[in-house]
Amino acid sequence: MRWPSSTPLATTAWATTLLLLSLSPLPTTAQLHHYARKAGLLYYGAATDSPGQRERANLQSTYPQYDAILSDPLEFGQTTPTNGMKWLFTEPLPNVFNFTEGDIVADLAASQQKLLRCHALVWHNQLAPWVESTVWTPPTLRAAITRHITAVATHYKGRCRAWDVVNEALDEDGSYRPSLFYTVLGEDYIKLAFNLTAQIDPAAKLYYNDYGIERPASVKTAGAKRIVKMLKDAGIKIDGVGMQAHLHADVHPTAQDHVDTMQSYLALGVDEVAFTELDVRITEPVNETKLEWQAEAYTNVATACARVKGCVGITLWDFYDPFSWIPVTFPGEGAGLLWFDDFKKHPAHDAVVETFKAIAAANGNGTTPCKNKRKRTVRKIGAVSP
Ligand code: XIL
């Protein structure tokens, strides 16, 4: 039998959520960001793509309803462009820059007063073909990275609350991924990227971002900590660790796993951590039991982020299932976000809202100001703990 891994504490939190759900009539419109703020987070957000890039073609008829949900300030207080700021789009040819796609989402964030996470400056994937086909030497690659970061970070200077400076530098075993960046420059490319971005946009929070770094005992978590320490030891600014959190409903981290992992990053001296690309995929066919597991996974993330002072927020990797990258990347899996194809909400949506409400109530308020005041401490949460 497949069942999500969970500790007794996580089960308690889930039971509490179910109890609350059964006792209280559900609001007609739940509000993720609104209640996340009350629970102490800075934001609950959703990444989005520019219209031409949305994962499936021929769904233009859904755009008005999609856009209405995304623009609801009570639902989402933050966004990230899922694709438009990547190298493929921003420097498609050597020294030819194009910010059209990235600007669509940056402008949307500005017009809707949403916080913006910018993503991603140096990543081995979705590189422009010319980057992959060039034969690099250390000096030429350093120059190319320098030119790329300088142009992109300068263009978005002052607009990005945070930048994913380096994305997915780690291989599955926790060692460095043998990307072209690593192969030519070793870990110096990471130092170069952070150093440069810090000079160009000193106000942005600079993140190392990866997947599979949500569990305390994972080899990739150890790798992410090595990267933070390597930069800190070199006196280079790194402000945060982004846990992508592309999770699976069947087996997912407990809230305590998330808390322990976040604390271990914060203990190295970064200011903050965030869940940056959250989705919880389900192996088809979707059924009620799997949706319950999914709700537990989402609830664990919400509970953990609310418990850890340095956890600034949670970003869904889009919010509407048809625009998710999951079915494209993981055949046979899907339904990982919080809105189904027909725009009905997943049970996880209201479970998360009820979790935040319970945490806010346990904190004795409906008006907790946003956090991040004290670092590396665990927030007190009365009745609800992971
Ligand atoms: C994904 C996008 O969602 C897709 O549209 C694209 O085809 C591939 O990339 N980790 C990341 C994101 O850091 O940039 C990836 O986004 C998902 C995995």
Image (tube, rainbow, N blue to C red):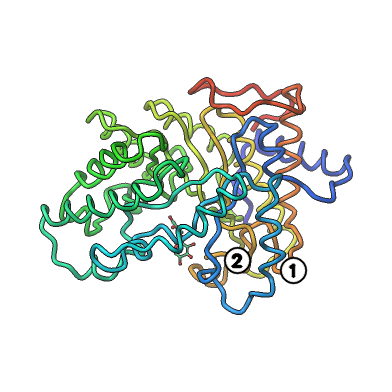
Q: Secondary structure at mark 1?
A: loop
Q: Residue at x 35, y 39 (%)?
A: 201
35 sits left or right of 100 in the view: right
Inspect the image, locate mark 2, and give the three-letter code of the amino acid beneath it: Gly
**Which is nearer the eye, 81 or 108?**
108
**Circle 1 Cα neighbour tier, 10 Å, few/some/many (<14 / 14–19 / ≥20):** few
Residue 117 lies, in percent from the top left, at 48, 46
Q: Secondary structure at mark 2?
A: strand
Q: Residue at x 62, y 56 (%)?
A: 2
Residue 160 lies, in percent from the top left, at 45, 44
* Residue 216 badge: none
Query: From what the image shows, is residue 183 above or below residue 220?
Result: below
Query: Which quadrant holds the C terminus?
Result: top right
The image quadrant of residue 59 is bottom right
Residue 344 lies, in percent from the top left, at 76, 62
Q: Is mark 1 within 8 Å of ligand 1?
A: no
Query: From what the image shows, is residue 121 above or below residue 227?
Result: below
Q: Residue at x 31, y 40 (%)?
A: 200
Q: Which residue is mark 2?
A: 334
Residue 96 lies, in percent from the top left, at 28, 65
Q: Residue at x 69, y 39 (%)?
A: 11
* Residue 342 badge: 1
* First-in-chain label (2 vs 1): 2
240 sits left or right of 40 in the view: left
Q: Quadrant of ligand 1?
A: bottom left
**Which is nearer the eye, 158 or 90?**
158
Asked if labels 1 and 2 touch by Cβ distance under 8 angstroms, the answer is no
Measured in 3D between alpha carbons, the distance from the residue under mark 2 to the one under mark 1, in whole angstroms, is 14 Å
